[in-house]
Amino acid sequence: MSLTLTLRATEAIDASSITPGASDFASLPCWVGRQRVALGELFDLRGEPSDDVRVEGDLRRVHGLGTGMSRGVLTVDGDVGDGAGVAMSGGLLRINGSAGDRLGAPLPGASRGMTGGEIIVRGNVGANAARRVRRGLVVVGGDAGPGAAHAMIAGTILVAGQLGAGAGLWSKRGSVIALGAVEIPATYKYACTYRPPYVLVLLRYLARVRQFATKAQCATGRYKRWTGDVADVGKGEILEWTT
């Protein structure tokens, strides 16, 4: 069984309570400004409580979907607001559109963002995607705004489109895979150009298991490997697809 939530409200909503596995979705608290409102007053519900949840409607003003998500599958049909997948630790967050700022980032004041699971966005994402990510996988089919993978601790972010300024700054470990244009920070050093085997494995996995296809030449092409951020631990990398 699965559960579908269809938005009927038009106000900006903090919907950080919406994660798979809840037992009584209709009574989950959401926030409209400073007012606490039961989820059932903002969304139509169809189906039964489940680890497979789908959210649909004009969700551009719905923020925080999947906050702290630890299991299951949360599918968003269309664009979504800021803070999707914040502090996520497991499961799959699938966004069939674009996402706002702070995708997979930390809760305010926290030292770690996403610590596990997968986030797959078909469209673009805003600023500070994968900020302070500790573990897990973030995949972006379009462009990523400035500050992607800022202070990344570990984990992987793959961006098929263009990466905004400051990608990977203050990264400790982890990988930024750039299939499109990327501006390499001055605090990264060129290491080599090669064909990283795990990128091929990842792209095949995304195509076969997640139905997320990339250009065929990205799986067989060569990548420039840049290591950094040397202003910090310096064990992270940016893999820049070349040919």
Image (cartoon, rainbow, N blue to C red):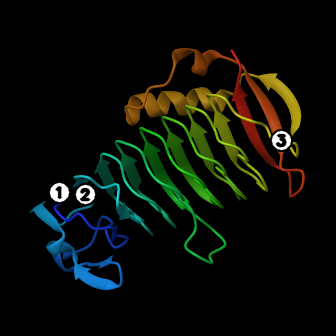
- Quarter in which the C terminus is drawn: top right
Helix, strand or loop at mark 1: strand
User: Splitting the image into 4 quarters, where does residue 130 fall?
Assistant: bottom right
The residue singled out by tag 1 in the image is: 4
Q: Mark 2: which amino acid?
A: Val
Against 45, is 191 above or below? above
The residue singled out by tag 3 in the image is: 227
Against 121, is 107 above or below? below
Q: Please give the name of the residue rendered at 38% of the width and 71% of the height, measured from the top-left corner.
A: 16
User: Splitting the image into 4 quarters, where does residue 90 fall?
Assistant: bottom left
Please give the label number shown on residue 140.
none
Helix, strand or loop at mark 2: strand
- Quarter in which the N terminus is drawn: bottom left
> Could you tell me residue 28's position as x and y percent?
25, 78
Determine crowd level at label 1: few under 14, some 14-19, many 20+ residues with C-alpha closer than 10 A: many
> Would you say the residues marked 1 and 3 are in contact, meaning their CB atoms lie under 8 Å apart?
no
Q: Nearer the viewer, residue 78 or 220?
A: 78
Q: Mark 3: which amino acid?
A: Thr
> Could you tell me residue 31's position as x and y percent?
32, 78
| Residue 47 visible, this angle | no
> Would you say the residues marked 2 and 1 are in contact, meaning their CB atoms lie under 8 Å apart?
yes
| Residue 202 visible, this angle | yes
Mark toward the start of the polypeptide (1 vs 3):
1
Spatial separation of the CA atoms under disc 2 and disc 1 = 6 Å
> Could you tell me residue 106's position as x and y percent?
58, 68
> Would you say the residues marked 3 and 2 are in contact, meaning their CB atoms lie under 8 Å apart?
no
The residue singled out by tag 2 in the image is: 53
- The answer to whether residue 24 is left or right of residue 127 is left
Q: Nearer the viewer, residue 226 or 12?
A: 12
